[in-house]
Amino acid sequence: MPSPRPRVAVVEDYGPMRALLLRDLAGSGFQVDGYADAASLWRHFSLHRFDLVVLNIGLPDEDGFSVSRRLRRQTNIPVVLLSGYGSHEHQLLGLRDGADAYLVKPVETRVLVATLQRLSRRLEPGEPGSRYQRDWRLADQGWLLCAPDGADIALNGHERDLLRALAAAGGDGLDADRLGALLVRPGAAFERRLLGRMVWRLRRKIAAFTPLPPPLRESGGVWRFAGLIEGDHPPD
């Protein structure tokens, strides 16, 4: 297993069912996060490191088949589909769309837990898989920003310099003055409004390619890049 307690995202729009699944899975040794729709999952996808996903098919915004296809394109995260439809056609469709298991509601907790435990054994430490693919990363010597959902965003020189400077600073990040000093020519004056404009344009560009939150984070006046430079390795 990738960790003593695999982290499971439970995507279920019916509140009582979601609460029941979260309680039972937490009681069975999993770390669990619950989401009421696909949009909530995607918003948190780049912020959390999920090992497994339990996914209801009948979501209010994006059906589980579509979510499963997107997850399969960009990750190796095992996916368990839950559905009130038990026909062979629905099961075949779910499995063809990339799901690793298809369970019919009402789901027996012991069956779900056993399924997740079996699937989690695929994620051995060091195995190429979902953790690295789910990170934002800079590729092609920093000229390409790769999103966790598979979108590739070409950067101009200013954007590349900005993200590379933040990536080089690591978890410590950079305040606006130090960051700005790295982005202007030697001896040139730095204006904070120029940095603000650059960040605004970059965020707008990212939003045109992916609905995921951008990897530029600001907290307490310190800016950070929440991603990897190609060739780095994710933390264990």
Image (tube, rainbow, N blue to C red):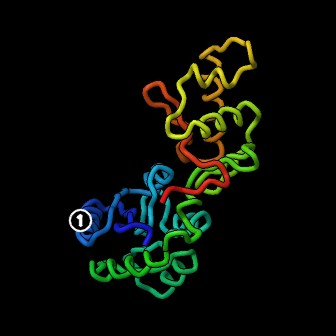
Q: Nearer the viewer, residue 199 or 141?
A: 141
Q: Residue at x 38, y 76 (%)?
A: 116
**Element marked by disc 1:** helix
Rendered view: 97 above or below 17: below
Q: Residue at x 65, y 20 (%)?
A: 181
Residue 133 position, x and y percent, is 59, 60
Rendered view: 187 above or below 182: above
Local packing at callout 1 (Cα closer than 10 Å; few below 14, some 14-19, many 20+) is: few
Left or right of 205, for residue 48: left
Q: Residue at x 37, y 56 (%)?
A: 35
Say which amino acid is labelled 1: Arg
Q: Can you say which quadrant of the picture contains the N terminus?
A: bottom left
Mark 1, residue position: 23
Picture quadrant where residue 97 is located: bottom right
Residue 30 position, x and y percent, is 32, 67
Rendered view: 43 above or below 12: above
Residue 47 position, x and y percent, is 46, 49
Q: Residue furthest bottom?
A: 88
Q: Which of 179 and 113 is in front in this view?
A: 179
Left or right of 30, for residue 193: right
Residue 52 position, x and y percent, is 43, 68
Left or right of 228, for residue 10: left
